[in-house]
Image (tube, rainbow, N blue to C red):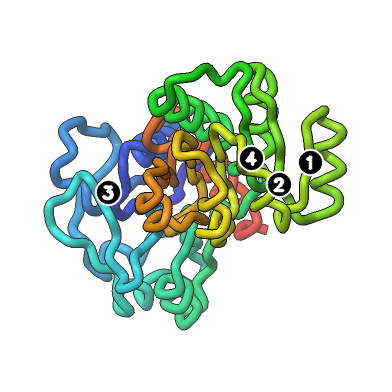
């Protein structure tokens, strides 16, 4: 239960609605900032403008998946006015307040560090990332089906990276009958690919591996699908880049070669916002409860 705990929300998208519901169900006191245009009302939540005074009693502050942009603006699909998180807002937070977001840009990290406010980046957590890989994989498969004229079964597929998303994706593609090759750097990842019954190769060999590829799925947030690699691909090939912006593909060169390359970060919030929101809600409320328990001790 979150009885007696004040949780403030600034901005967000449909995923945040699930977190708000969960906090209310657990009897937290909830303040919504940047939800002026939200049609549905939450019994037990109060809408307020973004002012330092509103934040001074917050025990937890929950921001969207991307906390702020490089200038401190917070995205909200439920508000027509810009939301700017500034020094005065951070200074008003209690020193034991914890700020939760998916990932923080340097602006937010620096802002909170100056005030010695704790920051939790949820997407760094294994549990969130593994749960999120489920809607990410479903969205990636949907994109592959929509943008090709072949079946996934029997197709020549490359997955780049064997992180939490890469592993789930490679397993799903294999289960659908694709001929899956996985490019990775770490020896333990290459060993795991082999153990999974797939074909491993070192990422440095990518240029030599793409001549017959139908679809490449990239999960590595660095430029790996370079012009040199793209030049070896068939024009009918498809690139689906799942890495965070700006992705790991030379999109301009791909377009020049007539190869379709799609950047698709944040798929959980696009293809399954309710599920993605529930994943965040379950983890955040548990962390807030733990935070409260530690404070009482």
Q: Which residue is mark 3?
A: 32
Kindly identify the residue that appears in the image at 60 percent across and 24 percent down. Answer: 155
Determine the CA span between mark 3 and mark 1: 48 Å
2 and 4 marks in contact (CB < 8 Å): yes
Q: Left or right: where does residue 203 sit relative to residue 101?
A: right
Q: Which residue is mark 4?
A: 159
Task: Give the SS element for disc 4.
Answer: strand
Determine the CA span between mark 1 and mark 2: 6 Å
Determine the CA span between mark 4 and mark 3: 40 Å
Determine the CA span between mark 2 and mark 3: 44 Å
Determine the CA span between mark 2 and mark 4: 6 Å
Kindly identify the residue that appears in the image at 45 percent across and 47 percent down. Answer: 4
Q: Left or right: where does residue 158 sit relative to residue 205?
A: left
Mark 4: few/some/many CA within 10 Å (<14, 14-19, 20+): many
First in sequence: mark 3 or mark 1? 3
In front here: 188 or 41?
188
């Amino acid at each position: 239960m979150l009885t007696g705990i004040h949780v403030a929300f600034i901005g967000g998208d449909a995923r945040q609605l699930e977190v708000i519901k969960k906090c209310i169900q657990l009897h937290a006191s909830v303040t919504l900032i940047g939800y002026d245009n939200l049609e549905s009302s939450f019994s037990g939540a109060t809408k307020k403008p973004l002012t330092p005074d509103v934040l001074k009693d917050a025990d937890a502050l929950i921001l969207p998946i991307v906390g702020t942009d490089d200038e401190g603006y917070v995205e909200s699909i439920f508000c027509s006015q810009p939301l700017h998180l500034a020094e005065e807002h951070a200074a008003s937070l209690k020193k034991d307040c914890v700020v939760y977001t998916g990932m923080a840009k340097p602006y937010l990290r620096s802002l909170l560090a100056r005030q010695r406010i704790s920051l939790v980046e949820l997407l760094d957590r294994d549990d969130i990332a593994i749960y999120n890989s489920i809607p990410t994989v479903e969205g990636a498969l949907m994109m592959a089906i929509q943008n090709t004229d072949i079946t996934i079964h029997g197709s020549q597929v490359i997955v780049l990276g064997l992180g939490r998303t890469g592993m789930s994706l490679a397993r799903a593609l294999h289960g659908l009958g694709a001929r899956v090759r996985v490019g990775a750097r770490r020896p333990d990842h290459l060993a795991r690919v082999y153990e999974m019954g797939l074909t491993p190769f070192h990422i440095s060999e990518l240029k030599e591996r793409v001549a017959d590829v139908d679809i490449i799925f990239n999960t590595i947030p660095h430029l790996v699908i370079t012009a040199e690699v793209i030049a070896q691909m068939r024009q009918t090939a498809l690139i689906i880049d799942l890495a965070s912006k700006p992705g790991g593909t030379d999109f301009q060169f791909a377009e020049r070669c007539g190869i379709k390359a799609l950047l698709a970060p944040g798929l959980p919030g696009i293809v399954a916002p309710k599920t993605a929101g529930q994943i965040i809600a379950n983890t955040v409320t548990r962390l807030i409860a733990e935070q409260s328990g530690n404070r009482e001790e």
